[in-house]
Image (spheres, grey):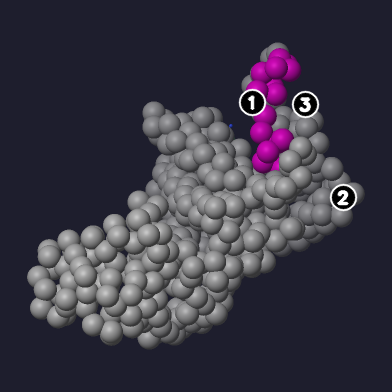
Amino acid sequence: MAQLWGGRFTKETDKLVYNFNASITFDKRFYEQDIRGSIAHVTMLASQGILTEEEKTQIIEGLEGIRRDVENGILEITEEYEDIHSFVEANLIDRIGDAGKKLHTGRSRNDQVALDMKLYTRDEIRELDGLLREMLEVLLKLMRENTETYMPGFTHLQKAQPITLAHHMGAYFEMFKRDRSRMKDIYTRMNYCPLGAGALAGTTYPLDREYTAELLDFAGPTLNSMDSVSDRDYLIELLSAMSTIMMHLSRFSEEVIIWNSNEYKFVEIDDAYSTGSSIMPQKKNPDIAELVRGKTGRVYGALMSLLTTMKGIPLAYNKDMQEDKELVFDAIDTTKGCLALFTGMLRTMKFNGDRMEESAKHGFTNATDAADYLVKHGVPFRDAHGIVGKLVLYCLEKKIALDDMTMEEFKAVSPVFEEDIYDAISMKTCVETRNTLGAPGKAAMDKVIVMETQYMEENPQI
Ligand code: ARG
C-alpha cells in the first residue's frame, strides 16, 4: 500500500478501509492528463525560480518516461497505489530520486485532481463533438438524397400529413446540432485552470497561475481557490447534455424499431447491425436500437447521482467528490459508444421508399389538402372538414384511398369537386406546396440543406 501521507499516522490503514478509499482502479484512466498537468506545473515552478532548470528537466524526462512506458505496456498501473497521483509520483521518485520529491511543491491533490478531471473531460467533450458531427454528416447526406422520398408524417403515432425522408432526417439534424452547441458552451465555460488553488486556500509559493493555464490551453486561471477545488458544475452540465443526446438517440431508436417492424417495413437494418433469434429463424432484431434506448437510463441515472452527491457538500473539497469519476466515465463511454453505433447503423440502413410512399397514400395523409381544396373553392373550413370526414368514412368502407375515388363518388358528397381534385391531393402536390421555411416542400428543404451545409463548414470539431 503506497501512500503519500504516512507521517502523521501510527497504525496502518485497515485493508478494507484502504480499498474503500482508493481510486486507482478508475482514476488510472487519466494518467496521461495527470502527467500533462505535472509537466506544466514544473515548467511554471522553474520559470518562477522555485525549481532549478536542471530539476525541471530531470522531472519532465522522468514523467515522459513514465508516460511512454505506460503507453507501451512496459509499466503497469497496479492497485498497490492509492490513486493515479501517488502512482506517478512514486514512480518518478524511483526513476530520478530526490528531484522527484519536489514535483508536488505548491500543489495539493485537491487542485491536481480538479485539473486532471477537467483535462480529461475537455478531451472527451472534443470527441463527443466529433461523433455528433459524424452523425450530422450522415443525416445531411440522407437529407440531400431524399428530398422527394415521400413518407407519412405522424402525430400521436397516427399518419397525419405526408412529408419526406429528408424532412424527417432534418428534425434529427436540428437535435444533434443543438447537442453540439451544448458541447461548445460547456467547453467554453469550464475552460479555466484550477491548478494553483492548493488544498483550498492557494499557496505561499509565488506561483504564476496565468502561465500554467496558458501552458495547458485554458482561457485563464480560475478566480476562487475554494471553488476551484470543489466545482463539479461542468460535470453536471456534461451529464445533462449527454442525457439529452441519449434522449435524442432513444427517440430515434424507437422510430427505427417501429420502421423495422413487419407491419411497417420502412427500413432494413444492415446485417452487421442486427441480430437473429436463437429460436425463431424468421427474425432479424433491431437489438442495437433497443440497447441504445435501454442505455439511456444509465446516463440519466449518472446525472441524478452526481446532483445528489453534490447537494450537501460544504466548501471546499470533501471526499464525496471522488464519486464524480466512475459515473462520468461510464456516462461518457456509454454516450460515445451509442453515438458511434447508431451512426454506423444509420449509414448502412436501407430505406424502402416505395413502402413509405405507399403507406403515406393509404393513411389519408392528404385529407387536410382535400379540405383545403374545398376552402379554396369557397367552402368554409368547418364545412370542408365535415365533407372530407364523410369521404374518409366512405373510403374506409370501400377500403380505398381518397385518390382512388371516381369523380362521381366525389360529386355525390360535394358538387364543388372538379377534375383538378386529383392533382390537388396527389402526394407530390401535398408535399411540394408546403414551402414555408422548415417545411418538407422541396424548395424549402433545398434552402435548409444549403444553410446546414454552410453550418457544417463553419463549425469544425471543437
Ligand atoms: N482520489 C481523490 C478524488 O478523486 C483525489 C483527491 C484526494 N484528496 C484528498 N484530500 N484526499 O477526489
Query: Distance of mark 1 from mark 2, alpha carbons?
Result: 26 Å
Instruction: Tell me the kind of residue under disc 3.
Output: Met
Q: Which residues are magenta?
A: 12-28
Can I make out residue 155 in this image? yes
Against 462, residue 248 (above or below) is above
Can I make out residue 317 in this image? no
Quadrant holding the C terminus: bottom right
Dot label at residue 73: 2
Q: Nearer the viewer, residue 79 or 402?
A: 402
Query: Distance of mark 3 from mark 1, alpha carbons?
Result: 12 Å
- The answer to whether the beta carbon of the residue marked 3 is less than 8 Å from any atom of ligand 1 is no
Dot 2 lies on which element?
loop
Q: Position of residue 186 (x, y in %)?
A: 44, 57
Residue 187 located within the stretch drawn in magenta: no
Task: Tell me which residue sits at (68%, 38%) in the image.
Answer: 26
Q: Which residue is identified by label 3? A: 1
Against 323, residue 127 (above or below) is below
Q: Is residue 141 left or right of residue 393?
A: right
Q: Is residue 373 left or right of residue 395?
A: left
Which residue is at the far right? 74
Q: Position of residue 385 (x, y in %)?
A: 18, 63
Mark 1 or 2 closer to N-term? Answer: 1
Task: Tell me which residue sits at (71%, 32%) in the image.
Answer: 82
Instruction: Tell me the kind of residue under disc 1.
Output: Asn
Instruction: Tell me the kind of residue under disc 2.
Output: Gly
Quarter where residue 379 is shown = bottom left
Query: Distance of mark 2 from mark 3, alpha carbons?
Result: 22 Å
Name the magenta segment's main secondary structure: helix
Q: Which residue is identified by label 1? A: 21
Neighbour tally class for label 1: few under 14, some 14-19, many 20 plus, Cα within 10 Å: few
